[in-house]
């Protein structure tokens, strides 16, 4: 079904949070650690970066947990500054990488996440729906008994005019007997082969005239209705569809950037691995997550 396709494809896209912190007009100081200050903007970032388990806490407790973590950071940061770690080459290299990563995230947010329009999501949904193969599903009831003779006796009662649901309540040994043997709607591949073959060949309103044997016993099956499987409504899969649009936008942004800048990989093994990994970007490449 379309829902499953969307979910499977969406699994290729890394789930990330793109919500930027909302800074107060006046970035108030909320705490001090020696000469170092913790401002509201830092606390907001700390809240957003809490461990997923702590994210489940009430808002006031989350703020306290975030503040506790921010104080710990400032305490050790002060120690690192006092020891001159801020001026080491290793620290500068890591800060350069972090800066590039955050710039990537900002660009990603502007040109991919925030650039998605409702019209693009609807168009992608319509495209996926149009590409779906037609699939039929049926609504059926059954009466399950242990022996073929019992099943034949059930068929005789139905031939005599008895109501199928009432006979199911009286004679069926399946757990759904109280529902008149109602199995609801199902597609091919959901039932055992013998049952499925019989159910899908019946005309609407008809029941099997001979017992259908399966590993569970003997069935008498009635077809209530048949229809084409309907795709889920857009509002049910909107988030997954949006991720598909985001993936396509990201691929387009990356391809454009590669066309404008020369990428040279000096290490031969890395070059070959990179080229192999990028041969089929549609299937294997997805938006890089914010870190």
Image (cartoon, rainbow, N blue to C red):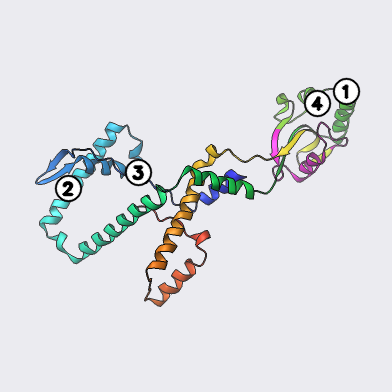
Q: Secondary structure at mark 3?
A: loop
Pick whichever of labels 2 and 4 is earlier in the sequence: 2
Q: Secondary structure at mark 4?
A: helix
The stretch in magenta equals: 184-211
Q: Tell me the quarter of the picture where residue 49 sits.
A: top left
Q: Would you call the spot at circle 1 few (<14 residues within 10 Å), some (14-19), or many (20 or more)?
A: few
Q: Tell me the quarter of the picture where residue 164 sits.
A: top right
Which quarter of the image is occupied by the N terminus?
top right
The residue lying toward the viewer, choosing from 289 and 91, is 289
Q: Would you call the spot at circle 3 few (<14 residues within 10 Å), some (14-19), or many (20 or more)?
A: few
Does residue 291 show up?
Answer: no
Q: CA distance from mark 4 to mark 1?
A: 9 Å
Q: CA distance from mark 4 to mark 3?
A: 57 Å
Pick whichever of labels 1 and 2 is earlier in the sequence: 2
Q: Nearer the viewer, mark 3 or mark 1?
A: 3
Pick whichever of labels 4 and 3 is earlier in the sequence: 3
Pick whichever of labels 2 and 3 is earlier in the sequence: 3
Queried whether the magenta region covers residue 209, the answer comes back as yes
Left or right, 226 with reference to 9: right
Q: Secondary structure at mark 2?
A: helix
Q: Which residue is mark 1?
A: 161
Pick whichever of labels 3 and 1 is earlier in the sequence: 3
Image mark for residue 29 = none
Q: Which residue is mark 2?
A: 74
Q: Which residue is mark 3?
A: 19
Q: Is residue 14 above or below residue 175?
A: below
Q: Would you call the spot at circle 2 few (<14 residues within 10 Å), some (14-19), or many (20 or more)?
A: some
Residue 136 point in image, percent of width and height: 72, 42
The residue lying toward the viewer, choosing from 213 and 257, is 257
């Amino acid at each position: 079904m379309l829902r499953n396709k969307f979910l499977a494809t969406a699994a290729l896209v890394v789930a990330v949070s793109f919500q930027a912190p909302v800074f107060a007009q006046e970035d108030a100081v909320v705490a001090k650690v020696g000469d170092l200050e913790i401002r509201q903007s830092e606390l907001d970032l700390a809240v957003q970066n809490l461990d997923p388990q702590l994210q489940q806490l009430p808002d006031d407790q989350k703020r306290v947990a975030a503040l506790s973590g921010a104080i710990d950071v400032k305490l050790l940061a002060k120690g690192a500054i006092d020891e001159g770690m801020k001026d080491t080459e290793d620290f500068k290299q890591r800060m350069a990488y972090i800066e590039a990563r955050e710039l990537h995230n900002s660009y990603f947010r502007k040109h991919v996440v925030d650039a998605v329009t409702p019209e693009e999501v609807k168009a992608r949904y319509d495209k996926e729906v149009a590409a779906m193969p037609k699939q039929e599903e049926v609504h059926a009831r059954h009466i399950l008994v242990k022996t073929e003779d019992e099943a034949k006796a059930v068929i005789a009662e139905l031939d005599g005019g008895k109501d199928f649901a009432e006979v199911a309540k009286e004679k069926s040994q399946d757990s759904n007997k109280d529902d008149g043997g109602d199995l609801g709607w199902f597609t091919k591949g959901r039932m055992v082969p013998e049952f499925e073959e019989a159910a899908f060949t019946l005309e609407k309103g008809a029941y099997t005239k001979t017992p259908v044997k399966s590993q569970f016993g003997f069935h008498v099956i009635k077809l209530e209705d048949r229809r084409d499987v309907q795709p889920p409504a857009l509002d049910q899969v909107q988030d997954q569809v949006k991720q598909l649009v985001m993936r396509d936008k990201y691929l387009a942004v990356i391809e454009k950037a590669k066309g404008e800048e020369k990428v040279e990989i000096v290490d031969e093994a890395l070059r070959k691995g990179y080229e192999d990994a990028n041969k089929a970007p549609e299937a294997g490449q997805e938006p890089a997550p914010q870190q």
